[in-house]
Image: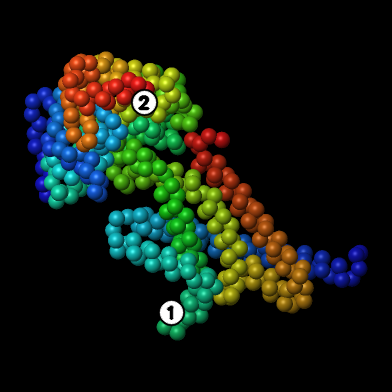
Amino acid sequence: MDAGLLNKRGSSMINIQNLYKRFDKLEVLKGIDLSIEKGKTAVIIGPSGSGKTTLLRCLNLLEIPDQGTIALGKQTLKITESTKLKQAEIVAFRKQTGMVFQGYNLFPHLTALENVMEGQITVLRRSKEAAREKAMSLLEKVGLKDRAEMYPFQLSGGQQQRVGIARAMAMDPEVLLFDEPTSALDPELVGEVLKVMKDLSREGMTMVVVTHEMKFASEAADQVIFMDGGVVVEKGTPNEVINETKNPRTLQFLNKVAER
Amino acid sequence: MFGERTDRIIGILSDSFFPILKAGLQFTIPLTLITFALGLILAFFTAVARLSAFKPLVLLTRFYVWIFRGTPLLVQLFIIFYGLPSVGITLNPFPAAVIVFTLNKGAYSSEIIRAAILSIPKGQWEAAYSIGMTKAQALRRVILPQAIRVSLPPLGNSFISLVKDTSLAATITVTELFQKGQQIAAVTYEPLWLYIEVAFIYLIFSTILSYLQDKLEIRYGRGIAK
């Protein structure tokens, strides 16, 4: 048993050291080191296959890393090849995070309101009334109070994604993880989702966002991380990484994105 | 009125209708409902066990499904009812039928439920996990409600076929609907009309049951575009 719980230190909310992950023969993460401070927004950019989504999924253990240390909030997981995590350990770690998915992944058999209530009732054991109250205030926050009783199929992609954000927020996570939250959206619906994300960022939510939206990265990120080939190539302020980079790989990627 | 033979047939059919219907209500319907309910419970646990990560359990359920899907229902009935007494286990006809039909339905329905669970996109599991659910919570609160919806039409079909399959219980002396019809046909020498009457009563039963199936599908259909 190598997974131990240590105390966190400093103001860093997430601290990743030497993180490795492979799928069969394919090595996806090759030693990632990263630190994200509490209340800050980190945006991960990079070409497809660079490992950015895998890194994000390692942060809430949807993928279990092969090796490395992840400190998140109050818990630290030290993982080696022989580590076998128990479900309770995974769940306890994961409860500190909320995730917003590219494909929304709302529960289709529940209304928007019920989607936001479900975890509060089943996982946090809140009363129905308390869960409803919290869910309604979150739906209001994402501008969907009047859509509360609708089922996901009755909502537009942008609305579904905003419900997805409310669902994640309802669990009072320490960190919100966004996995390409606007990639599946029609262009005219991207803005409404980014606006909600910017509001959260401004309010001091700790966020890790995988995205191709460079404008969002420039405007909302405190830290931009450029990944390629399973490693962090460059990290810094949006200005350093997006506007003033000298790194040829970063430049090549930014040019390709700009061509779209 | 229509001639002597026609009058005789009408007389036989009207005299036999309620006894046959009664046999249906007394045996066919209870046998169907009991074995379907028990079979569903068995099927549910079999499907979940089959999808578990615990190898011995997986092998055991695969073996069970293999046996009961791979052999005829009629042979299974005969083994349990006529075969087991030779090793000292004697069952009454009705319980024997309940056991065999339950095991048989359980095996078939477990495959339906397993397929339904597997048809739910991986993203649903991940969304459930991402809000801190355990595997059991995700299954109960997120996956199964959707899987039930998916499995209702095929389970409905299997339910309707069960109503008719129960006629095989006649072979182990359960006086259900078909057996009753057979008895009356044997003494009246009107097999054609008697068996048409039997078929008609089965049709009434399966029509009512498919109506119930439709109701259930509507009930579990919430959240999908029409």
| Image spot of residue B13 (x, y percent) | 77, 66
The answer to whether residue B197 shows anywhere in this view is yes
Query: Depth check: A249 or A3 in front?
Result: A249
| Image spot of residue B179 (x, y percent) | 64, 72
Closer to us: mark 2 or mark 1?
A: 2
Residue under pointer 2: A182
From what the image shows, is residue B159 above or below residue B221? below
Query: Depth check: A250 or B139 in front?
Result: A250
Name the quadrant of the C terminus of chain B. top right
Residue flagged by tag 1: what amino acid is it?
Ile
Residue under pointer 1: B89
Name the element at disc 2: loop
Q: Residues within 10 Å of mark 1 (few under 14, many from 20)?
A: few
What residue lies at 24% left-to-right and 27% top-to-bottom?
A44
- Tag 1, which chain? B
Name the element at disc 1: loop
| Image spot of residue B195 (x, y percent) | 72, 68
The answer to whether residue A171 shows anywhere in this view is no
Q: Which mark is residue A178?
A: none
- Residue A196 occupies which quadrant of the picture? top left
What residue lies at 76% left-to-right and 70% top-to-bottom?
B192
Residue flagged by tag 2: what amino acid is it?
Thr
Q: Residues within 10 Å of mark 2 (few under 14, many from 20)?
A: many
What residue lies at 17% left-to-right and 26% top-to-bottom?
A234
